[in-house]
Image: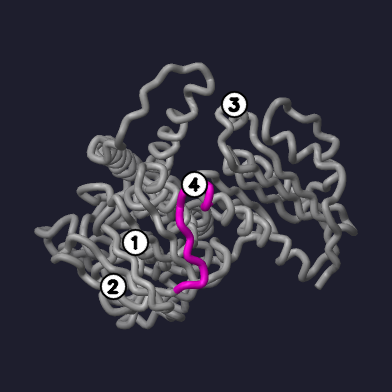
Amino acid sequence: MQELDLFVIGAGSGGVRCARIAAQNGARVGIAERRHWGGTCVNLGCVPKKLMVYAAETGRMIEDAPAFGWDVQRPETFDWYSFLAAKDREIERLNGIYISMLEKAGITLYTGDARLIDAHTIEIGPSVLAPDAPVQRVRAKKIVLATGSTPIRLDIPGAELAITSDELFHLPERPQKVAIIGSGYIGVEFAGILAGMGSQVDLFYRQTLPLRGFDGEVRAHLKELIDLYGITQHPGTSPVRLEDVGGGKAVRLILDDGTAHEVDAVIMATGRRAAIDKLGLDSVGVAMEKGHVVAGIDGRTNIPSIYAIGDIRDEYNLTPTAIAEGHMLAEQLFNPQGRTWSFETLPKAVFFSSPIGVVGLSEEEAAQKHDLAIYTSTFTPMRQTLPKRAGKVLMKLVVDRQSDIVLGAHMVGPDAPEIIQMLAIAVTAKLTKKQLDQTIALHPSTAEEFVTMRTPTRMVDKQ
């Protein structure tokens, strides 16, 4: 039986980073993956989704091209098959890169389902990716759980008729009429993607505004933009059941208000849960809470030799945070350097047709502890002026009145994620509004508005 210093279960973004950094610091490392090298982000998440965003965006650029003097013929339909083939080729290339990186680092790779036998022993058996793999056992001084999360469906009659984001990436054809349940990251993003590709999209959600948890002003602005992109919203609604129509030809969605909607596909973007089903956590006694692994800030579980990083902990549930957790844990175990990241000022993006970027506190969060000065600006971006495309940019700064520190920055509009990534440095460094004002604007750009908003839109007293 092979003896290792570290064994990582799950070769997603966090697990791969943890394994590589540990190996670079002299540890003998093994890693197991049951389905996708590179994890959800590369195979069923961030990367293919962003490629879909680009595909939908290209259609709008073709629509706008005549306004800029280009004589183009807009295609009548979007070629779903050609796009999927190109997407799959890129994902396959990235899979190979991940495997190559691990092998070059001297890490032993195992393909199959891994489960805990005891606090130091792992058994790897056949999986979807390797149905004929032999059963192997490995011992390790330290074990890291990094299996991520998986989509969930609502517990309603007919739920099996719906698909999740996992299946959407491999549909044989694009649904012409689609109902999306849920208005979080996944629901909002795929509503924009499918509408941009030519589908008729209905978006159903329980709240009065989409994107629960984000700044209220951002949510209200997004709701207006969703309408502009031709997506029909159904706020304040909940599905009660799904029904098969015509032997699988269509799906009927029944809502709590009694209305029915017949569509080609129903997508449940209704959350994710930790992927723990086959890990054998109960037999080892790893502490769980509401379906996810309980771990401290250092990643340690209640079992001293077992650690957990990424979505399996259900804390941040983003690729960059899983990478940071994996990196910090590997150094903590094999070469302590005191390295850390600022999780409090975690930048976030929602890749809707008009993308959203945020960092720091929302107005509602900040008002719980601070007296605020709120700066906002809304305007039509220059790129939309000639084609007269509707939809304004929203830019917002949340500033502490007493210290003048910028507590949060929010943007809805073209290039928002790129702009907010840079502004996140300022928020993390606790720069003041005065320091932003001292920065000379880069003109003409959308980003310059963040350093030219001189007068507060309103003052908000601490709640």
CA gap, disc 2 and disc 1: 11 Å
Which numbered circle lies on residue 242? 2
| Quarter assignment of residue 443 | top right
Q: Residues within 10 Å of mark 2 (few under 14, many from 20)?
A: many
Q: Nearer the viewer, residue 139 or 343?
A: 343
Label 3: element kind:
loop
Which numbered circle lies on residue 229? 4
Can you say whether 4 is above or below 207 in the image? above
Is residue 86 shown left or right of residue 217? Answer: left
| Quarter assignment of residue 15 | bottom left
Label 1: element kind:
strand
* Residue that mark 3 sits on: 386
Amino acid type assigned to the residue bearing label 2 in the image: Leu
Q: In percent of the image, x 44 and y 65: which residue is there?
A: 204
* Residue 359 visible somewhere in the drawing: yes
Mark closest to the chain's N terminus, 3 or 4: 4
CA gap, disc 4 and disc 2: 26 Å
Q: Are marks 4 and 2 in contact (CB under 8 Å)?
A: no
Label 4: element kind:
loop
Judged from this view, the residue extending furthest toward the right is 402
Label 2: element kind:
strand
369 is within the stretch colored magenta: no
- Tell me which segment is drawn in magenta: 226-237
Mark closest to the chain's N terminus, 2 or 1: 2
Q: In percent of the image, x 39 and y 69: which residue is there?
A: 274
Q: Residues within 10 Å of mark 3 (few under 14, many from 20)?
A: few
